[in-house]
């Protein structure tokens, strides 16, 4: 196993111990780290500045914490670039949307491909054991895995489809038991089953903001 694979393995093992999709967990952490790193280390990096300007800054999802960021100077330098770039068009009443893609979204896509590729290539029983003990991939990440991986291993396909089927069953039961006159059935649901709609919403959306 290469050193990089080893690092990915440990990141996945850690993410699998947390609730929710492990790849969503890794991606959120890496995106935060990327933004942090760009603001602290690369604010004067011409290549990054050009990409940032072309994209019109981070997308709304990745820019959501900038106003509470600890380094106001970095946010000001990058923000001034964007506003100075946009102002001439605004004063000419021209709507010219930025052409580039949010650099944090580009990074997210790279991380997702790397980790999904890693999951799809693994047949190690230890890996399978901790992965199948997790909540599994969200729908968008499983869908992406289908396009990234050359071949989906049987264990993964079985695990994911069974998880989605069980989620669907539980959601249907929640809907049925929510009907008028079925209060007793509803009361018999476990706490997790009473909140299955939240699980369903997250499984369908993922939590990477893309
Ligand atoms: Zn996910
Ligand atoms: Zn973004």
Image (spheres, rainbow, N blue to C red):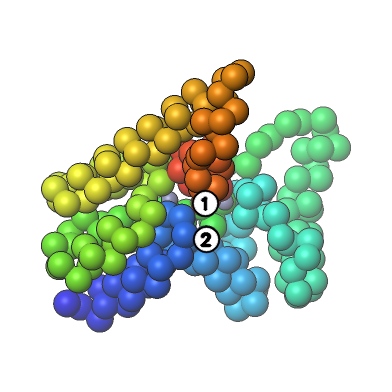
Coordinates of residue 171 in the picture (x, y in percent): 46, 32
Tell me the quarter of the image containing the N terminus: bottom left
Coordinates of residue 40 in the picture (x, y in percent): 65, 77
Q: Residue at x 42, y 54 (%)?
A: 21
Q: Residue at x 86, y 37 (%)?
A: 91
Identify the disc placed on residue 136.
Answer: none
Helix, strand or loop for disc 2: helix
Q: Quadrant of residue 187?
A: top right
Q: Residues within 10 Å of mark 1 (few under 14, many from 20)?
A: many
Confirm whether residue 193 shows in the render: yes
**Viewer-side residue, 81 vs 206:** 206
Q: Which residue is mark 2?
A: 28
Q: Earlier in the sequence, mark 1 or mark 2?
A: 2
Q: Residue at x 75, y 75 (%)?
A: 71
Coordinates of residue 131 in the picture (x, y in percent): 29, 61
Identify the disc placed on residue 208.
Answer: 1
Circles 1 and 2 in contact, beta carbons < 8 Å: yes
Compared to residue 119, the image places residue 190 above or below, namely above
Q: Is residue 193 left or right of residue 167?
A: right
In the picture as drawn, the residue positioned furthest to the bottom comes out as: 3
């Amino acid at each position: 196993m290469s050193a990089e694979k080893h690092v990915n393995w440990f990141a996945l093992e850690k993410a699998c111990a947390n609730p929710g999709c492990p790849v969503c967990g890794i991606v959120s952490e890496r995106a935060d780290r990327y933004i942090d790193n760009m603001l602290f280390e690369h604010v004067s990096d011409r290549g990054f500045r050009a990409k940032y300007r072309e994209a019109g800054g981070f997308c709304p999802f990745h820019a959501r914490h900038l106003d509470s960021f600890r380094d106001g100077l970095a946010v000001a330098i990058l923000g001034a670039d964007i506003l100075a770039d946009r102002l001439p068009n605004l004063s000419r009443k021209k709507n010219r949307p930025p052409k580039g893609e949010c650099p944090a979204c580009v990074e997210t896509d790279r991380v997702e491909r790397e980790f999904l590729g890693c999951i799809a290539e693994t047949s190690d029983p230890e890996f399978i054991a901790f992965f199948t003990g997790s909540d599994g991939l969200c729908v968008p990440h499983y869908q992406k895995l289908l396009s990234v991986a050359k071949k989906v291993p049987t264990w993964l396909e079985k695990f994911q489809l069974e998880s989605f089927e069980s989620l669907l069953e539980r959601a249907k039961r929640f809907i049925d038991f929510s009907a008028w006159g079925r209060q007793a059935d509803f009361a018999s649901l476990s706490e997790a089953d009473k909140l299955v709609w939240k699980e369903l919403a997250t499984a369908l959306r993922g939590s990477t903001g893309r």
